Image (cartoon, rainbow, N blue to C red):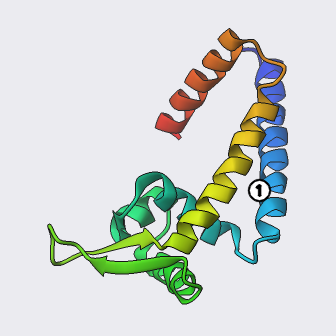
């Protein structure tokens, strides 16, 4: 890849990130939650109950930072903690019914966004885009 192509790719990545981030912040702003709180809801909604340590790893934060976020979500009735039946040393976190409803609403918005992003792509291009994102996510 030439230096010009690398520069163009870098600009495209930044532009896409800025648009996606702006969209996410705009959508989350209307919920009264922070983007980090919504990210917790997204991860738990897609994975059911997780250990705090595992959730923190998926988010790329410390368990201490996650505890603060989880406390706020628990106070709002969106998340609950419960003992881990298979490992008594750990605590599982999971969404409440209200949390699951928030996840479903937000997930629908993500599906709508995905539809809009790939609207001008062929089926083959969409599949290639998905494969490229999988590769990027594995290595990033």
73 and 98: which is toward the camera = 98
Q: How many marks?
A: 1
Residue 91 at x, y = what percent? Answer: 29, 77
Above/below status of 108 relative to 131: below
Q: In the figure, 106 relative to 97: above or below? A: above
Q: In this view, does 33 lie above or below 25?
A: below
Q: Quadrant of residue 114?
A: top right
Taking 60 as reference, is 118 left or right?
Answer: right
Instruction: Name which residue lies at 24% across and 75% down.
Output: 90
Quadrant location of the N terminus in the rendered image: top right
Q: Is residue 39 visible?
A: no
Which residue is nearer to you in this view: 123 or 11?
Answer: 123
Q: Quadrant of residue 33?
A: bottom right
Residue lying farthest to the bottom in this orientation: 75
Q: Would residue 117 be visible to someone looking at this image?
A: yes
Residue at image point 76% right, 65% down: 28
The residue shown at (82%, 70%) is 30
The vertical placement of 34 against 55, above or below, is: below
Q: Residues within 10 Å of mark 1 (few under 14, many from 20)?
A: some
In the figure, residue 112 lies in which quadrant?
Answer: top right
List the residue tagged with mark 1. Answer: 24
Q: Which residue is drawn at 68% across and 57% down?
A: 106
Q: Position of residue 53 (x, y in %)?
A: 35, 68
Kind of element beneath mark 1 = helix
Q: In this view, does 11 lie to the left or right of 35?
A: right
In front of the other: 138 or 108: 108
Image location of residue 78, percent across then percent down: 55, 77
């Amino acid at each position: 890849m030439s230096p010009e192509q690398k520069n163009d790719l870098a600009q495209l990545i930044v532009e896409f990130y800025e648009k996606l981030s702006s969209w996410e912040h705009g959508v989350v702003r209307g919920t009264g939650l922070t983007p980090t709180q919504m990210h917790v809801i997204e991860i738990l909604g897609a994975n059911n109950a997780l250990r705090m340590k595992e959730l923190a790893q998926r988010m790329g934060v410390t368990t201490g930072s996650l505890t603060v976020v989880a406390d706020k979500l628990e106070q709002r009735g969106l998340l609950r903690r419960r003992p881990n039946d298979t490992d008594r040393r750990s605590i599982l976190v999971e969404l409440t019914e209200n949390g699951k409803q928030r996840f479903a609403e937000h997930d629908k918005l993500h599906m709508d966004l995905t539809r809009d992003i790939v609207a001008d792509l062929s089926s083959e291009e969409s599949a290639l885009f998905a494969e490229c994102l999988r590769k990027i996510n594995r290595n990033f």
